[in-house]
Image: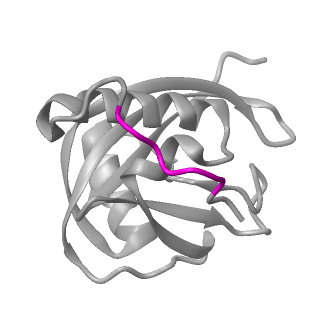
């Protein structure tokens, strides 16, 4: 590796008791066809928070408020195996109309109580667990809160 790396942000968007998941386009070079939360690169001279606001609008058409960071992650991307480090942020949708960008081929609002039942990557499972842990005191749910049965991933 030549010492270069990417800084990326991911954003979990919440609205009305649901979280937005996006299915990556089959044409994507990293994780094609997988469901995840939105994400993108931080541009040179841009802060991670600025990147979240820009990427959320570009990928979903939604305006968001950034509530705070949820988790960090690390991976190697593409054929060149570029090293990437990232931060996942909790966001709340505040406006706009949901649209699916060319980077994705489907969007789905998933009930919050089904998040831990999804078949997803480890980094997303950690993100969902952090989101639910932060949400529990405000929602009145404790560690034993019930989860919907079955898998929701298709």
Q: Main secondary structure of the magenta part?
A: loop
Spot occupied by residue 150 in the image (x, y as percentages of width and height): 64, 53
Is residue 128 shown left or right of residue 133?
Answer: right
Is residue 78 a member of the stretch shown in magenta?
no
Relative to the observer, which residue lies in front, 66 or 49? 66
Residue beneath the point at 43% across and 82% down: 99
Residue beneath the point at 16% across and 29% down: 137
Relative to the observer, which residue lies in front, 152 or 51? 152
Which quadrant holds residue 63?
bottom left
Residue beneath the point at 29% across and 83% down: 97
Which quadrant holds residue 146?
top left
Q: Height in image: 106 above or below 15?
A: below
Is residue 146 a member of the stretch shown in magenta?
yes
Can the viewer see residue 73 in this picture?
Answer: yes
Spot occupied by residue 84 in the image (x, y as percentages of width and height): 61, 29
Spot occupied by residue 59 in the image (x, y as percentages of width and height): 45, 68
Q: Height in image: 119 above or below 107?
A: above
Relative to the observer, which residue lies in front, 13 or 76? 13
Quarter of the picture containing the N terminus is top right
Start-end of magenta stretch: 145-151
Quarter of the picture containing the C terminus is bottom right
């Amino acid at each position: 590796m030549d010492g270069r790396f990417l800084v990326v942000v991911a954003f979990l968007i919440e609205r009305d008791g649901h979280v937005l998941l996006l299915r990556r386009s089959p044409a994507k070079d990293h994780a094609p066809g997988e469901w995840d939360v939105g994400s993108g690169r931080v541009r040179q001279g841009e802060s991670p928070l600025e990147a979240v606001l820009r990427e959320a609008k570009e990928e979903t058409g939604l305006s968001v408020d950034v509530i705070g960071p949820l988790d960090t992650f690390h991976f190697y991307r593409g054929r060149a195996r570029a090293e990437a480090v990232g931060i996942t942020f909790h966001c709340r949708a505040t406006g706009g109309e949901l649209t699916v960008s060319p980077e994705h081929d489907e969007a789905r609002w998933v009930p919050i109580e089904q998040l831990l039942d999804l078949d997803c990557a480890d980094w997303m499972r950690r993100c969902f667990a952090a989101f639910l842990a932060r949400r529990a005191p405000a929602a009145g749910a404790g560690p034993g809160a019930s989860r919907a049965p079955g898998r929701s991933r298709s």
